[in-house]
Amino acid sequence: MENAAVRVRNLRKTYGSRAAVDDVSFDIIRGETFALLGPNGAGKSTTVEILEGYRRRTSGEVTVLGDDPGHAGLAWKARLGIVLQTTGQAGAFTVREQLRQFAGYYPRPRDVEEVIAAVGLEEKANTRISKLSGGQQRRMDVALGIIGNPELLFLDEPTTGFDPQARREFWGLIRRLQGEGTTILLTTHYLDEAAQLADRVAVIDRGLLQAIGPIATFGGEDARMPRVTWREGGTLHTESTPAPWAFARSLAERLGGEPDELEIRRPTLEDIYLGMVDPDEAVAPASSPTSSTSETLS
Ligand code: ADP
Protein backbone atom coordinates (compact mmCIF):
# COMPACT_ATOMS: atom_id res chain seq x y z
CA MET A 1 0.00 0.00 0.00
CA GLU A 2 1.59 3.27 -1.12
CA ASN A 3 0.35 5.50 1.65
CA ALA A 4 1.29 3.09 4.40
CA ALA A 5 3.68 4.48 7.01
CA VAL A 6 4.06 0.97 8.39
CA ARG A 7 3.64 -2.30 6.54
CA VAL A 8 3.91 -5.58 8.42
CA ARG A 9 3.47 -8.95 6.73
CA ASN A 10 3.58 -12.34 8.45
CA LEU A 11 5.79 -11.02 11.22
CA ARG A 12 7.18 -13.68 13.49
CA LYS A 13 9.52 -13.46 16.45
CA THR A 14 10.54 -16.50 18.44
CA TYR A 15 12.45 -16.75 21.68
CA GLY A 16 13.73 -20.30 21.79
CA SER A 17 10.83 -22.44 20.69
CA ARG A 18 8.17 -19.91 21.79
CA ALA A 19 6.63 -17.45 19.37
CA ALA A 20 6.17 -14.05 21.01
CA VAL A 21 4.71 -12.72 17.74
CA ASP A 22 3.18 -15.15 15.32
CA ASP A 23 2.24 -14.36 11.73
CA VAL A 24 1.06 -10.82 12.40
CA SER A 25 0.13 -8.58 9.46
CA PHE A 26 -1.18 -5.00 9.43
CA ASP A 27 -0.67 -1.58 7.86
CA ILE A 28 -0.64 1.83 9.47
CA ILE A 29 -1.77 4.46 7.01
CA ARG A 30 0.00 7.82 6.91
CA GLY A 31 -1.75 10.31 9.16
CA GLU A 32 -3.72 7.80 11.17
CA THR A 33 -3.49 6.91 14.84
CA PHE A 34 -3.30 3.18 15.31
CA ALA A 35 -3.72 1.62 18.75
CA LEU A 36 -2.15 -1.74 19.51
CA LEU A 37 -3.95 -3.37 22.43
CA GLY A 38 -3.49 -6.60 24.30
CA PRO A 39 -2.84 -8.07 27.73
CA ASN A 40 0.61 -8.24 29.30
CA GLY A 41 2.86 -10.63 27.46
CA ALA A 42 0.74 -10.47 24.29
CA GLY A 43 3.62 -9.40 22.06
CA LYS A 44 3.01 -5.65 21.78
CA SER A 45 6.47 -4.48 22.87
CA THR A 46 8.15 -7.08 20.70
CA THR A 47 6.17 -5.87 17.67
CA VAL A 48 6.77 -2.20 18.40
CA GLU A 49 10.47 -2.66 19.06
CA ILE A 50 10.88 -4.50 15.77
CA LEU A 51 9.23 -1.54 14.02
CA GLU A 52 11.52 0.87 15.85
CA GLY A 53 14.60 -1.10 14.81
CA TYR A 54 15.48 -2.19 18.34
CA ARG A 55 14.78 -5.90 17.87
CA ARG A 56 15.41 -8.29 15.02
CA ARG A 57 12.56 -10.29 13.64
CA THR A 58 12.74 -14.02 13.05
CA SER A 59 10.80 -13.81 9.77
CA GLY A 60 8.27 -11.77 7.86
CA GLU A 61 8.39 -8.43 6.05
CA VAL A 62 8.46 -5.07 7.78
CA THR A 63 8.61 -1.65 6.15
CA VAL A 64 8.56 1.55 8.21
CA LEU A 65 8.58 4.88 6.34
CA GLY A 66 9.74 3.02 3.27
CA ASP A 67 12.69 1.22 4.85
CA ASP A 68 13.38 -2.06 6.59
CA PRO A 69 13.98 -1.17 10.27
CA GLY A 70 16.49 -4.02 10.47
CA HIS A 71 18.83 -2.20 8.09
CA ALA A 72 17.80 1.47 8.16
CA GLY A 73 20.25 4.15 9.25
CA LEU A 74 20.35 7.39 11.19
CA ALA A 75 18.51 9.47 8.58
CA TRP A 76 15.58 7.04 8.86
CA LYS A 77 15.73 7.07 12.65
CA ALA A 78 15.52 10.86 12.66
CA ARG A 79 12.07 10.59 11.07
CA LEU A 80 10.74 8.63 14.05
CA GLY A 81 9.69 9.92 17.44
CA ILE A 82 9.77 7.45 20.29
CA VAL A 83 8.20 7.94 23.70
CA LEU A 84 9.11 4.94 25.82
CA GLN A 85 7.37 3.80 28.97
CA THR A 86 10.27 4.84 31.13
CA THR A 87 12.93 7.29 30.22
CA GLY A 88 16.22 7.91 31.88
CA GLN A 89 16.29 11.66 31.49
CA ALA A 90 19.20 13.65 32.81
CA GLY A 91 17.68 15.77 35.55
CA ALA A 92 20.38 18.43 35.74
CA PHE A 93 19.22 20.30 32.63
CA THR A 94 16.25 22.61 32.43
CA VAL A 95 13.34 21.83 30.11
CA ARG A 96 14.50 24.41 27.57
CA GLU A 97 18.16 23.37 27.70
CA GLN A 98 17.42 19.73 27.14
CA LEU A 99 15.04 20.41 24.27
CA ARG A 100 17.60 22.70 22.59
CA GLN A 101 20.20 19.99 22.92
CA PHE A 102 17.95 17.32 21.44
CA ALA A 103 16.79 19.65 18.66
CA GLY A 104 20.43 19.80 17.58
CA TYR A 105 20.44 16.07 16.83
CA TYR A 106 17.81 16.32 14.12
CA PRO A 107 17.97 17.70 10.58
CA ARG A 108 14.52 19.36 10.70
CA PRO A 109 13.64 19.95 14.36
CA ARG A 110 10.58 21.74 15.57
CA ASP A 111 10.91 25.13 17.17
CA VAL A 112 11.85 24.61 20.83
CA GLU A 113 9.50 27.30 22.17
CA GLU A 114 6.62 25.90 20.12
CA VAL A 115 7.19 22.43 21.54
CA ILE A 116 7.35 23.79 25.10
CA ALA A 117 4.01 25.52 24.51
CA ALA A 118 2.49 22.46 22.82
CA VAL A 119 3.13 20.29 25.88
CA GLY A 120 2.07 23.03 28.28
CA LEU A 121 5.41 23.50 30.01
CA GLU A 122 5.86 27.25 29.40
CA GLU A 123 5.99 28.01 33.09
CA LYS A 124 8.50 25.25 33.66
CA ALA A 125 10.83 26.07 30.76
CA ASN A 126 13.61 27.14 33.13
CA THR A 127 12.98 24.40 35.69
CA ARG A 128 15.32 21.46 36.03
CA ILE A 129 13.75 18.27 34.80
CA SER A 130 14.40 16.56 38.14
CA LYS A 131 12.12 19.13 39.78
CA LEU A 132 9.12 18.41 37.51
CA SER A 133 6.11 16.45 38.75
CA GLY A 134 5.47 12.98 37.30
CA GLY A 135 2.88 14.30 34.85
CA GLN A 136 5.15 17.16 33.79
CA GLN A 137 8.04 14.74 33.24
CA ARG A 138 5.78 12.66 31.02
CA ARG A 139 4.94 15.74 28.98
CA MET A 140 8.67 16.35 28.74
CA ASP A 141 9.05 12.79 27.41
CA VAL A 142 6.53 13.64 24.72
CA ALA A 143 8.27 16.95 24.01
CA LEU A 144 11.51 15.02 23.42
CA GLY A 145 9.60 12.56 21.25
CA ILE A 146 8.28 15.29 18.95
CA ILE A 147 11.21 17.76 18.95
CA GLY A 148 12.65 16.10 15.84
CA ASN A 149 9.38 16.73 13.97
CA PRO A 150 8.74 13.00 13.44
CA GLU A 151 6.59 11.59 10.66
CA LEU A 152 5.81 8.59 12.84
CA LEU A 153 5.42 8.82 16.60
CA PHE A 154 5.49 5.79 18.88
CA LEU A 155 3.66 6.36 22.15
CA ASP A 156 4.02 3.57 24.70
CA GLU A 157 1.60 3.82 27.62
CA PRO A 158 1.82 7.61 27.44
CA THR A 159 -0.55 8.54 30.27
CA THR A 160 0.17 5.91 32.91
CA GLY A 161 0.08 7.65 36.27
CA PHE A 162 -1.71 10.77 35.00
CA ASP A 163 -4.63 12.25 36.92
CA PRO A 164 -7.84 12.66 34.87
CA GLN A 165 -7.20 16.35 34.20
CA ALA A 166 -3.65 15.71 32.97
CA ARG A 167 -4.92 12.92 30.69
CA ARG A 168 -7.48 15.25 29.10
CA GLU A 169 -4.78 17.84 28.48
CA PHE A 170 -2.51 15.18 27.05
CA TRP A 171 -5.23 13.99 24.69
CA GLY A 172 -5.56 17.59 23.51
CA LEU A 173 -1.86 17.60 22.69
CA ILE A 174 -2.14 14.35 20.75
CA ARG A 175 -5.09 15.74 18.80
CA ARG A 176 -3.00 18.74 17.78
CA LEU A 177 -0.29 16.39 16.50
CA GLN A 178 -2.95 14.40 14.63
CA GLY A 179 -4.20 17.65 13.13
CA GLU A 180 -0.69 18.29 11.81
CA GLY A 181 -0.68 14.91 10.07
CA THR A 182 1.62 12.95 12.40
CA THR A 183 1.17 9.19 12.14
CA ILE A 184 0.91 7.66 15.63
CA LEU A 185 1.28 4.14 16.95
CA LEU A 186 -0.20 4.04 20.43
CA THR A 187 -0.01 1.25 22.95
CA THR A 188 -2.12 1.71 26.03
CA HIS A 189 -3.91 -0.21 28.75
CA TYR A 190 -6.57 2.48 28.91
CA LEU A 191 -9.27 1.42 26.49
CA ASP A 192 -11.01 4.78 26.78
CA GLU A 193 -7.77 6.41 25.68
CA ALA A 194 -7.64 4.21 22.59
CA ALA A 195 -11.32 4.96 21.91
CA GLN A 196 -10.68 8.71 22.25
CA LEU A 197 -7.55 8.92 20.13
CA ALA A 198 -7.29 6.06 17.67
CA ASP A 199 -8.68 5.81 14.16
CA ARG A 200 -8.11 2.06 14.14
CA VAL A 201 -7.27 -0.56 16.72
CA ALA A 202 -5.69 -3.98 16.65
CA VAL A 203 -5.90 -6.51 19.46
CA ILE A 204 -3.03 -8.93 19.88
CA ASP A 205 -3.11 -11.83 22.32
CA ARG A 206 -0.55 -14.58 22.81
CA GLY A 207 1.33 -13.31 19.79
CA LEU A 208 -1.65 -13.58 17.45
CA LEU A 209 -3.62 -10.77 15.88
CA GLN A 210 -7.16 -11.28 17.14
CA ALA A 211 -8.93 -8.41 15.45
CA ILE A 212 -8.24 -5.19 13.59
CA GLY A 213 -10.53 -2.46 12.42
CA PRO A 214 -11.79 1.13 12.66
CA ILE A 215 -12.87 2.26 16.12
CA ALA A 216 -16.35 3.00 14.80
CA THR A 217 -17.06 -0.58 13.78
CA PHE A 218 -14.55 -2.51 15.87
CA GLY A 219 -15.62 -5.93 17.08
CA GLY A 220 -18.43 -6.33 14.59
CA GLU A 221 -22.16 -5.76 14.79
CA ASP A 222 -22.97 -8.40 17.38
CA ALA A 223 -20.36 -7.27 19.88
CA ARG A 224 -21.45 -3.63 19.41
CA MET A 225 -25.17 -4.30 19.86
CA PRO A 226 -26.76 -1.96 22.44
CA ARG A 227 -27.66 -3.53 25.77
CA VAL A 228 -30.76 -2.87 27.83
CA THR A 229 -30.55 -3.78 31.52
CA TRP A 230 -33.31 -3.57 34.10
CA ARG A 231 -34.31 -5.15 37.41
CA GLU A 232 -37.42 -7.29 37.56
CA GLY A 233 -38.51 -9.59 40.36
CA GLY A 234 -35.25 -8.99 42.18
CA THR A 235 -33.10 -10.11 39.23
CA LEU A 236 -31.00 -7.97 36.91
CA HIS A 237 -31.80 -8.76 33.27
CA THR A 238 -29.83 -7.88 30.15
CA GLU A 239 -31.05 -7.89 26.57
CA SER A 240 -28.87 -7.13 23.55
CA THR A 241 -30.99 -5.64 20.80
CA PRO A 242 -30.54 -3.45 17.73
CA ALA A 243 -33.68 -1.53 18.78
CA PRO A 244 -33.11 -0.72 22.47
CA TRP A 245 -35.65 2.11 22.71
CA ALA A 246 -38.50 0.07 21.27
CA PHE A 247 -37.53 -2.76 23.58
CA ALA A 248 -37.50 -0.46 26.63
CA ARG A 249 -40.90 0.98 25.63
CA SER A 250 -42.46 -2.46 25.36
CA LEU A 251 -40.89 -3.35 28.69
CA ALA A 252 -42.42 -0.25 30.29
CA GLU A 253 -45.83 -1.15 28.85
CA ARG A 254 -45.61 -4.67 30.16
CA LEU A 255 -44.49 -3.54 33.64
CA GLY A 256 -46.87 -0.58 33.78
CA GLY A 257 -44.13 2.05 34.21
CA GLU A 258 -40.40 2.61 33.91
CA PRO A 259 -38.52 -0.57 34.83
CA ASP A 260 -36.28 -0.42 37.91
CA GLU A 261 -32.64 0.41 37.20
CA LEU A 262 -33.31 0.75 33.49
CA GLU A 263 -30.14 1.44 31.53
CA ILE A 264 -29.47 1.49 27.80
CA ARG A 265 -25.90 1.53 26.64
CA ARG A 266 -23.72 0.62 23.74
CA PRO A 267 -20.76 -1.61 24.61
CA THR A 268 -17.58 0.39 25.07
CA LEU A 269 -14.28 -0.51 23.44
CA GLU A 270 -13.37 -1.99 26.82
CA ASP A 271 -16.41 -4.31 26.79
CA ILE A 272 -15.58 -5.42 23.26
CA TYR A 273 -11.90 -5.88 24.08
CA LEU A 274 -12.61 -7.93 27.20
CA GLY A 275 -14.88 -10.15 25.15
CA MET A 276 -11.90 -10.84 22.87
CA VAL A 277 -9.13 -11.50 25.38
CA ASP A 278 -11.07 -13.00 28.29
CA PRO A 279 -9.19 -16.25 28.96
CA ASP A 280 -12.46 -18.19 29.13
CA GLU A 281 -13.64 -16.88 25.79
CA ALA A 282 -10.42 -16.25 23.94
CA VAL A 283 -9.81 -19.84 22.89
CA ALA A 284 -11.97 -19.64 19.79
CA PRO A 285 -10.72 -16.31 18.37
CA ALA A 286 -7.10 -17.29 19.04
CA SER A 287 -7.13 -19.59 16.04
CA SER A 288 -9.28 -17.51 13.75
CA PRO A 289 -9.54 -13.74 13.36
CA THR A 290 -13.27 -14.13 12.82
CA SER A 291 -15.79 -12.77 10.40
CA SER A 292 -16.87 -10.27 13.04
CA THR A 293 -13.60 -8.39 12.65
CA SER A 294 -14.28 -5.34 10.60
CA GLU A 295 -11.47 -5.47 8.11
CA THR A 296 -9.86 -8.14 6.06
CA LEU A 297 -6.14 -8.52 6.37
CA SER A 298 -4.57 -8.10 3.01
P1 ADP B 1 3.69 -7.13 25.80
O1 ADP B 1 4.47 -5.94 25.37
O2 ADP B 1 2.40 -7.29 25.05
O3 ADP B 1 3.47 -7.17 27.28
P2 ADP B 1 6.07 -8.61 25.04
O4 ADP B 1 6.26 -8.31 23.60
O5 ADP B 1 6.93 -7.86 26.01
O6 ADP B 1 4.53 -8.46 25.43
O7 ADP B 1 6.31 -10.16 25.30
C1 ADP B 1 5.71 -11.18 24.53
C2 ADP B 1 6.23 -12.53 24.97
O8 ADP B 1 7.60 -12.67 24.65
C3 ADP B 1 6.12 -12.75 26.47
O9 ADP B 1 5.77 -14.08 26.70
C4 ADP B 1 7.52 -12.46 26.96
O10 ADP B 1 7.79 -13.18 28.13
C5 ADP B 1 8.36 -12.94 25.80
N1 ADP B 1 9.63 -12.18 25.70
C6 ADP B 1 9.76 -10.86 25.48
N2 ADP B 1 11.06 -10.51 25.38
C7 ADP B 1 11.77 -11.64 25.55
C8 ADP B 1 13.18 -11.95 25.56
N3 ADP B 1 14.10 -10.99 25.36
N4 ADP B 1 13.53 -13.22 25.74
C9 ADP B 1 12.62 -14.21 25.93
N5 ADP B 1 11.28 -13.98 25.92
C10 ADP B 1 10.86 -12.73 25.75
Image (cartoon, helix red, strand yellow):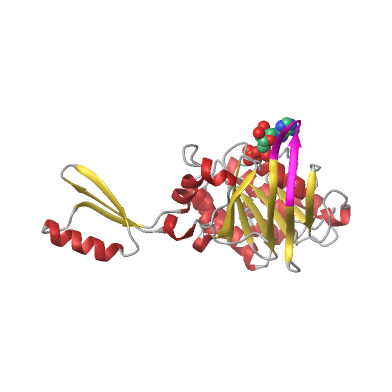
Give the percent coordinates (x, y) of residue 103.
80, 55
Q: Is residue 27 above or below residue 20?
A: below
Q: Which sits in the foreground, 90 or 297?
A: 297
Q: Quadrant of the C terminus?
A: bottom right
Give the percent coordinates (x, y) of residue 144.
73, 50
Which residue is at 47% across, 37% downward?
280
> In the picture, residue 208 is in which quadrant?
top right
12 part of magenta stretch: yes
Which residue is at 51% across, 56% downward?
195
> In the picture, residue 180 is in which quadrant?
bottom right
Q: Is residue 253 above or below residue 94?
A: below
Tell me: 195 left or right of 136. Answer: left
Q: Quadrant of the N terminus?
A: bottom right
The residue sitting at the top extreme is 16
- Residue 280: tell me if it is visible: yes
Q: Is residue 292 above or below residue 56?
A: below
Q: Which sits in the foreground, 56 or 194?
A: 56
Q: Which sits in the foreground, 55 or 14?
A: 14
- Residue 198: tell me if it is visible: no
Q: Quadrant of ligand 1?
A: top right
204 part of magenta stretch: no
Which residue is at 80% across, 47% downward?
53
Per the rendered image, the range of residues in magenta is 10-20
